[in-house]
Amino acid sequence: MFGATGGIGRQLLAQAAVAGHEVTAVARDPRRLPPGVRAVTADLSAPAAAALRDAVVGADAVLSAVGPSGRAAAGITEPATRAIVDAMAEAGVRRIVVVSAAPVGTVPSPGNPHPPKHDPGDGLLMRYVVGPLIKAALRDHYADLARMEDVLRGSGLEWTAVRPPKLTDKPLTGAYRTALDRNVRGGAFASRATVAACMLASLERPETVGRTVGVAD
């Protein structure tokens, strides 16, 4: 698991433990991880190939909640994901589920230079008011995520990208909604706990392989 010390990553660790999964977590500072988790020390801003390979070898799947800790760190997700994908290919691990974001489907990238102007799941307010404002404010972050999805599409791996809208810290209710290859209609918020639950559930949903999953509370 990558990004295990962030908001979604901590939820992934907790929910995976409850489900009985054996987890290896990659962290720059393993002291921030809960006890009982196998830790691998690595800095994804300058990843060491050997450390990443050791982290994923023998795994059934990889979960990545990697993302910038702030605007100054925008741009980390694509190169980090590329390093993870390379490590997986070397270790023979096929399945990966990552966190992306709801606006990314309409953001151009080198691999998708002409995306649709609007996501088919977005309503009028999101299409013409909220969406443009969010994309302008977080332009570099979403461009990074769009390039990350390019990496996944070109990897040959069995990938899934989960695209939540605005994140909250509300508790998990289990009553969340998903949509394949589009955003959830009317879905303005998703808790970090919900995103983690959706990522774990996607591992058991073969129909999500090679696709994006919109999720919302």
Image (cartoon, rainbow, N blue to C red):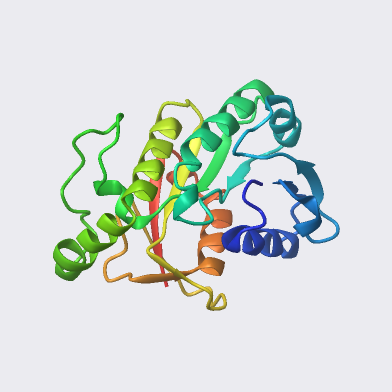
On the picture, is 111 further left or further right than 13? Answer: left
Write the residue at 47% across / 26% down. Answer: 155
In the rendered image, which quarter contains the C terminus?
bottom left
Place of residue 77 in the rendered image (x, y in percent of width and height, measured from the top left): 49, 42
On the picture, is 188 further left or further right than 96? Answer: left
Place of residue 177 in the rendered image (x, y in percent of width and height, measured from the top left): 40, 67
Write the residue at 80% across / 46% down. Answer: 39
Between residue 77 and residue 118, name the one nearer to us: 77
Relative to 131, does residue 159 appear above or below in the rendering?
A: above
Report the number of numbered marks. Answer: 0
- Residue 42 visible, this angle: yes
- Residue 181 visible, this angle: no
Write the residue at 47% across / 51% down. Answer: 72
On the picture, is 125 further left or further right than 54? Answer: left
Q: Residue furthest front?
A: 72
Between residue 77 and residue 102, name the one nearer to us: 77
Q: Residue furthest top?
A: 90
| The quarter of the displayed image where residue 9 is located | bottom right
Place of residue 114 in the rendered image (x, y in percent of width and height, measured from the top left): 18, 36
Between residue 60 and residue 147, name the one nearer to us: 147
Relative to 191, does residue 23 appear above or below in the rendering?
A: above
On the picture, is 67 further left or further right than 136? Answer: right
Place of residue 163 in the rendered image (x, y in percent of width and height, measured from the top left): 40, 55
Relative to 135, does residue 54 appear above or below in the rendering?
A: above
